[in-house]
């Protein structure tokens, strides 16, 4: 019998497979990026249908089998609502993570940075979309080893919050952050 794992995860995206199945891309604190198959989730009667919507925060039950991960159950904790611009920013950050992270590896800093970005971007009132996106992308690249904190000489990487004072600090060094981000993305060759 297979063991069932329960974890809080962000739904970064999905890919349809078959008539009613989907491959769901989850980023969890415990397992990192997980590609899990959800059977019959596209059907109207599926109970997991809304819990596994893109860019939502969910409590997922996962089973690791011979052919990979399967979603055994899911409950939505927070569905992505709010300003479409905020959701679009989180979507771009999710695509970057799916592009750069290849295997399953626990990365608590990356999960915390994504979780805090999700919290900041799916609120009703957000005004600093561009700055949050720059900081989020920089933290993703930092967590994956593409940017060093010493190179930028900033405290932005010592925490994962997206509050006013941190965004003001990021705004003052916007050009250096963008230069480092663009250089790091070019070096990934993806």
Image (cartoon, rainbow, N blue to C red):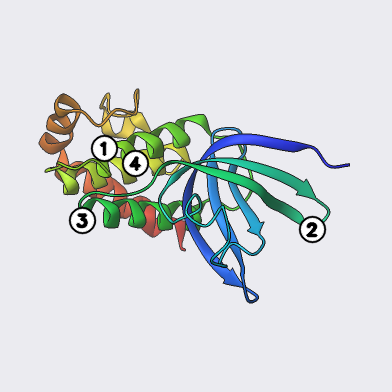
Q: Quadrant of residue 119?
A: top left
Kindly identify which residue carries mark 2: 67
- Is tag 3's residue or tag 4's residue first in the polypeptide sequence? 3
Kindly identify which residue carries mark 3: 85
Q: Position of residue 32 (x, y in %)?
A: 57, 41
Using the image as rendered, state which of residue 9 and residue 97 is in the foreground: 9
Up/down of 143 relative to 99, above or below = above
Q: Is residue 11 visible?
A: yes
- Is tag 2's residue or tag 1's residue first in the polypeptide sequence? 2
Question: What residue sits 80% from the left and 37% below the top?
Answer: 3
Crowding at mark 2 (Cα within 10 Å: few <14, some 14-19, many 20+): few
Tag 4 near tag 1, CB within 8 Å: yes
Mark 2: secondary structure: loop
Q: Measure how far apart labels 3 and 4 are at the Cα level.
A: 12 Å
Crowding at mark 1 (Cα within 10 Å: few <14, some 14-19, many 20+): many
Mark 4: secondary structure: helix
Kindly identify which residue carries mark 1: 120
Q: Measure how far apart labels 2 and 4 are at the Cα level.
A: 30 Å
- Is tag 3's residue or tag 1's residue first in the polypeptide sequence? 3
Mark 3: secondary structure: helix
Kindly identify which residue carries mark 4: 118
Q: Measure how far apart labels 4 and 1 are at the Cα level.
A: 5 Å
Crowding at mark 3 (Cα within 10 Å: few <14, some 14-19, many 20+): some
Question: What residue sits 83% from the left and 54% below the top?
Answer: 66
Tag 3 near tag 1, CB within 8 Å: no
Q: Position of residue 133 (x, y in %)?
A: 25, 47
């Amino acid at each position: 019998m297979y063991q069932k794992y329960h974890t809080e995860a962000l739904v970064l995206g999905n890919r349809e497979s078959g008539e009613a199945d989907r491959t769901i891309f989850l980023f969890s604190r415990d397992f990192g990026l997980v590609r899990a198959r959800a059977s019959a989730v596209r059907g109207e009667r599926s109970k997991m249908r809304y819990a596994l919507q893109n860019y939502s925060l969910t409590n997922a039950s996962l089973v690791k089998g011979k052919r990979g991960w399967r979603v055994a159950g899911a409950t939505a904790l927070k569905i992505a609502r709010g300003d479409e611009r905020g959701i679009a920013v989180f979507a771009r950050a999710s695509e970057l993570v799916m592009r750069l992270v290849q295997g399953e590896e626990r990365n608590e800093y990356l999960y915390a940075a994504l979780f805090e970005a999700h919290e900041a971007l799916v609120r009703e009132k957000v005004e600093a979309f561009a700055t949050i996106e720059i900081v989020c992308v920089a933290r993703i690249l930092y967590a994956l080893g593409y940017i060093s904190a010493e190179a930028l000489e900033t405290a932005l990487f010592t925490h994962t919050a997206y509050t006013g004072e941190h965004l003001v600090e990021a705004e003052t060094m916007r050009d250096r952050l963008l230069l480092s981000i663009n250089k790091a993305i070019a070096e990934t060759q993806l």
